[in-house]
Image (cartoon, rainbow, N blue to C red):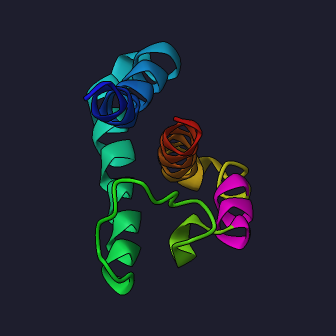
Amino acid sequence: MLKFIIHYGLHFGLPLLIALVWFRHNWLKAYLIMLLTFIIDLDHLLANPIFDPNRCSINFHPLHSDFAIIVYVLLLLPKQTRLIGLGLLAHIIADSVDCLL
């Protein structure tokens, strides 16, 4: 249960913290854009079984791979894609912490 709380707390809390600290004037828009990056979890549909609570997503699913993470870091560079990159990396951080638990 604690793992569940930490996992989803990070998934929803980390983007909220980023939005409130660095995008104070448009925090809701920034938060919603970062939440939309959860779409990368669609790659879980390629796994068998689709959901395994003991599986580490990092380097198992294609959109959670090292190559994808490099692309997410590069998305931080242009201002136009920065929020998307931040959301994707926040998601990867949340999943990485989940792998440690």
> Per the image, is 86 magenta?
no
Q: Residue at x 39, y 44 (%)?
A: 34
Using the image, determine if residue 36 lies above or below residue 44: above
Name which quarter of the figure residue 6 lies in. Answer: top left
Residue at the limit of the structure toward the front, as seen here: 54
Q: Which residues are magenta?
A: 66-73
Residue 11: x, y in percent?
Answer: 37, 37
Q: Residue at x 39, y 56 (%)?
A: 37
Q: Residue at x 37, y 35 (%)?
A: 7
Name which quarter of the figure residue 50 lies in. Answer: bottom left
Report the quarter where the N terminus lies: top left
Q: Nearer the viewer, residue 14 or 25?
A: 14
Q: Nearer the viewer, residue 85 or 50?
A: 50
Using the image, determine if residue 46 lies above or below residue 81: below
Using the image, determine if residue 76 lies above or below residue 24: below
Residue 95: x, y in percent?
Answer: 49, 47
Q: Relative to 83, is 39 on the left or the right?
A: left
Using the image, determine if residue 39 lies above or below residue 92: below
Q: Relative to 60, is 23 on the left or the right?
A: left
Q: Main secondary structure of the magenta part?
A: helix
Q: Residue at x 34, y 47 (%)?
A: 33
Residue 18: x, y in percent?
Answer: 48, 24
> Per the image, is 69 magenta?
yes
Q: Nearer the viewer, residue 28 or 6?
A: 6
Name which quarter of the figure residue 17 lies in. Answer: top left
